[in-house]
Structures are given as structure tokens and as C-alpha cells.
Image (spheres, helix red, strand yellow):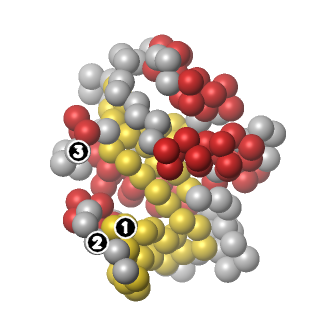
Amino acid sequence: MLETDRLIIRPLNRRQLLQYFRNDGSFEAGLKLPPSRLVMTPDLKEAFELSILPYTKDHLPSRFYYTLWSIIRKSEPCLVGDLCFKGPPNPMGEIEIGYGTYPDFQGQGYMTEAVGGLIGWAFSQPDVSCIFAETEKSNPASMRILQKNNFQLFSQTGETCLWRIEKLL
């Protein structure tokens, strides 16, 4: 579990992931949080089915790179969003991060703070040297989150921008 000034960032275990996937309120109840407006988008459902649930079945050291990390506000505790990595580091030490803020909490700096916390965790891992992120050109809020966390734009293709930040040695 990670903490920032305003947030707790919690990697979910298998039981919590299954509760989250069911989207029946049991996830929030298990964390003693009020019900939230979790939205299981088609992309998130596919990620759960193809990578998150299969790769978190066992207690593998790489499970933290496959699980969802939930963001909990400390004041008036509630869920404000989620983050994840899209698998473990490749042989060059590169990983990709993804994130989403629940609509009621957008524009309040929570995701900027959470991404910063997860960057700190990732760069404390000896096998991580670089973090990538992809945003749509039509999503300036997501781009600002990355810019505020010192990601650098390095490529644009069609409708997307590719960003990266490297571990300082």
C-alpha cells in the first residue's frame, strides 16, 4: 500500500479483484467505503478477462504489475479512481501505466498525485528503468497529468500521444 498527502493507493488482491469485477458493491463494502460509481467499460472488462485475473491467480512476484491499484481519498474516504501497469517490465526495464479518475473526482489533482505515487513505487523496483503512457490527443486532462509528473512526449501517431519518463540514476 502507498500513501501520498491526500491518498491511499492500494494494490488489489485476487479476492478484491473478483469483487471489483462483479461490480455489486461488495468491493467497497470489503474496504469499508461508501458505494461508488464503478464503471466496467468494455476495455476494462477485456483487461480483467485477458490479463488482470489470469495473471493475479498465483502469488507471483510480478502480480503488482498486473493488478489494479485503487485510489482512496483519505479525507471522507471513498474511491476516486484506479491505476495499473500493463504487465511487468520488458527486458529493457520498460513498463506502461494506465489510469482513470471517476467522474465526480476529475479536475481535483487526485490522479496527478496518484500517478506520482505509483511512479515512485515503480522506480523503487530494481528492474524498472522507464515508464510509458499513451493518451488520446483529444484528452488534454490526461496529458496534463503526465506533464505534471515529468513525462516527456516522444511520439505521436494518428490520434494518440506516447509519453515516457526515465528513472534518474
Residue 161 x %, y %: 36, 76
**Do the residues under discs 3 and 2 have CB atoms within 8 angstroms?**
no
Q: Residues within 10 Å of mark 1 (few under 14, many from 20)?
A: some
Residue 11 x %, y %: 57, 40
- Mark 1 and mark 2: span between their CA atoms? 6 Å
Residue 110 figure quarter: top left
Q: Residues within 10 Å of mark 2 (few under 14, many from 20)?
A: some
**Screen quadrant of the N terminus:** top right
Q: Which residue is mark 1?
A: 135
Query: Reading the chain from its start, which is encountered first: label 3 or label 2?
Result: 3
Q: Residues within 10 Å of mark 3 (few under 14, many from 20)?
A: some
Question: Which residue shows up at 42% across the image and 52% down it?
Answer: 99
Query: Reading the chain from its start, which is encountered first: label 3 or label 1?
Result: 3
Q: Amino acid at mark 2?
A: Lys
Query: From what the image shows, is residue 45 above or below residue 164?
Result: above
- Mark 3 and mark 2: span between their CA atoms? 18 Å
- Mark 3 and mark 1: span between their CA atoms? 16 Å
Q: Nearer the viewer, residue 167 or 13?
A: 13
**Do the residues under discs 3 and 1 have CB atoms within 8 angstroms?**
no
Secondary element at tag 1: strand
Question: Which residue shows up at 23% across the image and 60% down it?
Answer: 141
Question: Which residue shows up at 55% across the image and 41% down it?
Answer: 45
Residue 97 x %, y %: 50, 60
Q: Which residue is mark 2?
A: 137
Q: Is residue 147 visible?
A: no
Question: Which residue shows up at 43% across the image and 69% down it?
Answer: 134
Label drawn at residue 106: 3
